[in-house]
Image (cartoon, rainbow, N blue to C red):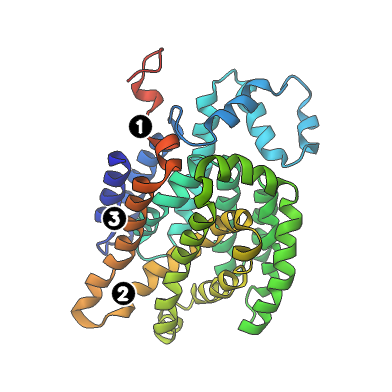
Amino acid sequence: MLPYVLIYLLLCLSGAPRMTKGASAFIVFFWGFFLLLFMGTRYWVGCDYFGYLSRFNNIDYEGPFFSYLFREEPSFHLLNYFVHSFDLGYVWLIFVSSLIILICYIRFSFLSARPLLVLALFFPVMIVQLGMSGLRQAIAAGFVMMALTSFTAMGRVSFVVLILLGSTFHKSAIIFLPLVFLIGKEFSGLKLLLMSFVLLPLVGFLLGDRLDVYQDRYVDQIYGQSSSGGALIRYVLILIPYAFFLYVRDSVKHELSRIYPLMNLFMFLTIAVFPLAIFSTTALHRMIYYLMPVSILVFVSCAPYFLKSNLARVSILMPVLVYGVYLVGWFGSSRHADSCYVPYKSELFIDESGRL
């Protein structure tokens, strides 16, 4: 647990102060390189490590290139194909996947005035729990995040392209394609809540029979009887920032006009998926990964407005504390964390026998 907690604390300490854009970019890319090594060179770390290794070793990649374009979620097959075609090992699949994930995460983080703090809050869930285990959805979530940066810039074509690209890694990303019709438009909470009647059946349709596979592979075997509790805890985690958002909504709308529509939209979308907590906690697990990045953006952006005058500087510690408590609590109580992430090992520091 200690390496993960230490990295989180150092990320937060580096990201909390306000900096010039140049200094902020330099530190973000420094940490991005570190996280690339941390994620991309892991050795038997992450609950899906063996599953992706089996796929990498057992799927026949001797066929023609175009044959992989017609498989379900073809981009990850193509990624495997290219790693095989250069006669590279499995670690390179993880490394390239991690590079794609981090490029997307970092690009999204610059929607905030404190991009490194956003990246720090990504660490417990988006980087460790998703990015170091569920490679395909982590890449898909990354492309959704890139699409959301286009949403804030009124880029309809790029939004559609990025969502479609993300869906070629994990088809659930296509759920967010209808948001293109809301770019630059005024919308009401009632309309967005009505969208949930379309959104929730679409989630079930896109995941389909995979829900049973996810339940067995990622939830029951790992979380056991606490599976629904874990999903609900993370759902509460992404709801917390919107309490701050509602309190300072007028100030944020005036001073953060570029990202306000995105934050307002995702507040309603987060509320709209609540029925999943009743009908399918497995689907809720999956949706949380797409909703959490904007929730974190809201937390970092709104916290300074929550307390006035000199206390505004202290208020930025609230997001750090909330996600820090979650990280420590998760490592301290979850069999998932203990079995999949401890001890941390890297290809950079092991010998041929796999020992440090």
Q: In the drawing, does residue 35 fall left or right of residue 52?
A: left
Query: Which of the labelled discs sits on residue 304, or is there none?
Result: 2
Residue at the outermost left position:
310
Q: Please name the amino acid that badge 2 sits on.
A: Pro
Query: Which of the labelled discs sits on residue 12, or is there none?
Result: 3
The mark lying in front, picked from 1 and 2, is 1
Residue at the image position 24 percent from the left and 55 percent from the top? 13
Whichever of callouts 2 and 3 sits on the residue coming sooner in the sequence is 3
Q: Mark 1 Cα within 10 Å, few/some/many (few <14, many 20+)? A: few
Whichever of callouts 1 and 2 sits on the residue coming sooner in the sequence is 2
Where does residue 46 sit, x and y in percent of width and height? Answer: 48, 36
Q: Please name the amino acid that badge 1 sits on.
A: Pro
Q: Secondary structure at mark 3?
A: helix
Whichever of callouts 1 and 3 sits on the residue coming sooner in the sequence is 3
Query: Which of the labelled discs sits on residue 332, or is there none?
Result: none
Query: Which of the labelled discs sits on residue 343, or is there none?
Result: 1
Q: In the drawing, does residue 303 fall left or right of residue 249?
A: left
Q: Secondary structure at mark 2?
A: helix
Where does residue 21 sit, x and y in percent of width and height? Answer: 33, 60
| Cα separation between marks 1 and 3 | 23 Å
